[in-house]
């Protein structure tokens, strides 16, 4: 009887070891490069918008770049740190004017940030409990933050007009709080007008941040405090403010940087030439650069301002992180 034989499977030839591991290595390399490829557009944009202009500004601060050399930078003489010596010398006219603008900006920033945070926190705490019309009030409070800055400031400039402005009409004609119509955009009142506009624009941002932070506070803490007999002020001092500490740390830093660097508000409100009482550093640098065409000194002031803000930010973060670690 004939036996039936089945064909035997032929084993494929062995693949080389390096070819077997090529595909996994390619997949790993793609996964490794993917985050960098996704970040590349943002990095390029950051370099083009911030890093390169800052480097150019730092180089301009080392040149005697005036109207005589603005068309051809290569002809501007290199003066090193002479621009910094001139603008930071308080005994010179340029240094005294910059010091005056610096102190005006410091006072302006402290008052504006403090009142903006106080108004925003107060409004957020009062609107924490649900009631009829709360959503409408929240939307109205956020309106100044949603308006374009130029639209808002131009409107305020009309309101502050001496003869036709609504501010004088209400204070003088309606409430009879003032005997004569004051000038708000020149003289000593210009600082008050600038503060009003700044606070009106920035306090809704504080309100929004604090309101978001209040949503993360557990209701059990308030219930426990109420059971222990704590009133509104005690709950505010012992529960709300301590729990809002992380939010306030970031909020105050952001408000400080925004307010200290504020250029749009005084520029639009005063038309690019602020009075001495409201001469902020940003406007002073603009006037020194584009009014007198001394871009070397203006760049030196800008770099000095950048270094000051970096030092304040680093010190603030260092102190707050040390307190957090101690706690």
Image (tube, grey):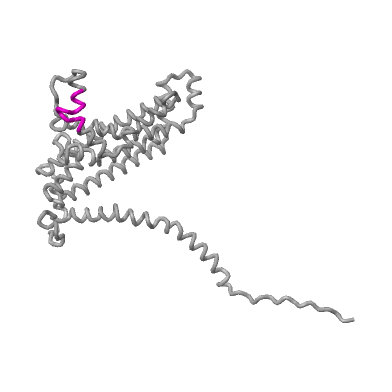
- In this rendering, would 251 be left or right of 292? right
Circle count: 0
Position of 282 relative to 69 (above/below): above
Residue drawn 23% across and 38% down? 265
Q: Nearer the viewer, residue 195 or 185?
A: 185
Give the answer, above or below, for where 205 lies relative to 302. Answer: above
Q: In the image, residue 208 lies at what x, y percent?
A: 38, 34
Q: Which residue is painted at 64% across and 77% down in the image?
A: 13
Q: Quadrant of residue 72?
A: bottom left
- Examine the structure image and report whether residue 168 is included in the region drawn in magenta: yes
| Furthest residue in direction bottom, as rendered | 2
| Residue most extreme to the right | 1
Quadrant where the N terminus lies? Answer: bottom right
Q: State yes or no: residue 42 in magenta.
A: no
Q: Nearer the viewer, residue 327 or 219?
A: 219
Q: Residue furthest front?
A: 164
User: In the picture provided, is 199 more to the left or to the right than 327?
Assistant: left
At 17% from the left and 45% from the top, the residue drawn is 286
The quarter of the displayed image where residue 284 is located: top left
Percent x, y for residue 289? 15, 48
In the displayed structure, does residue 195 sit left or right of residue 237?
A: left
Q: Nearer the viewer, residue 65 or 207?
A: 207
Quadrant for the C terminus in the image: top left
Give the extent of the magenta segment.
158-169
Q: Quadrant of residue 66?
A: bottom left
Residue 263 on image: x %, y %: 23, 41
Residue 169 percent location from the top left of the image: 19, 23
């Amino acid at each position: 009887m004939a036996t039936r034989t089945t064909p035997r499977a032929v084993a494929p030839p062995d693949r080389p070891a390096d070819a077997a591991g090529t595909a996994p290595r390619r997949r790993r390399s793609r996964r490794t490069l993917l985050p960098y490829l996704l970040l590349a557009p943002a990095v390029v944009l950051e370099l083009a918008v911030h890093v390169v202009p800052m480097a150019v500004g730092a180089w301009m601060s080392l040149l005697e770049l005036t109207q005589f050399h603005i068309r051809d930078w290569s002809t501007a003489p290199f003066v090193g740190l002479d621009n910094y010596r001139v603008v930071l010398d308080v005994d010179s006219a340029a240094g005294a004017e910059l010091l005056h603008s610096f102190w005006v900006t410091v006072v302006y920033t402290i008052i504006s940030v403090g009142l903006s945070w106080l108004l925003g926190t107060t409004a957020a705490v009062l609107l924490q409990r649900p009631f009829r019309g709360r959503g409408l009030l929240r939307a109205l409070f956020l309106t100044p933050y949603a308006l374009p800055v130029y639209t808002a400031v131009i409107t305020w400039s009309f309101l502050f007009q001496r003869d036709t402005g609504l501010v004088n009409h209400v204070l003088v004609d309606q409430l009879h709080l003032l005997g004569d119509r004051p000038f708000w955009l020149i003289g000593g009142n210009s600082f008050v007008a600038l503060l009003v506009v700044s606070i009106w624009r920035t306090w809704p941002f504080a309100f929004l941040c604090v309101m978001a932070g209040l949503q993360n506070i557990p209701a059990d803490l308030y219930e426990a405090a109420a059971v222990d007999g704590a009133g509104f002020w005690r709950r505010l001092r012992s529960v709300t403010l301590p729990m809002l500490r992380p939010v306030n740390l970031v909020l105050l830093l952001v408000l400080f940087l925004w307010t200290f660097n504020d250029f749009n508000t005084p520029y639009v409100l005063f038309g690019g030439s602020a009075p001495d009482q409201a001469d902020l550093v940003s406007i002073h640098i603009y006037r020194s650069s584009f009014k007198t065409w001394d871009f070397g000194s203006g760049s030196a002031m800008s770099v000095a301002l950048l270094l000051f803000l970096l030092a304040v930010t680093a010190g603030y973060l260092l102190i707050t992180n040390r307190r957090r670690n101690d706690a």
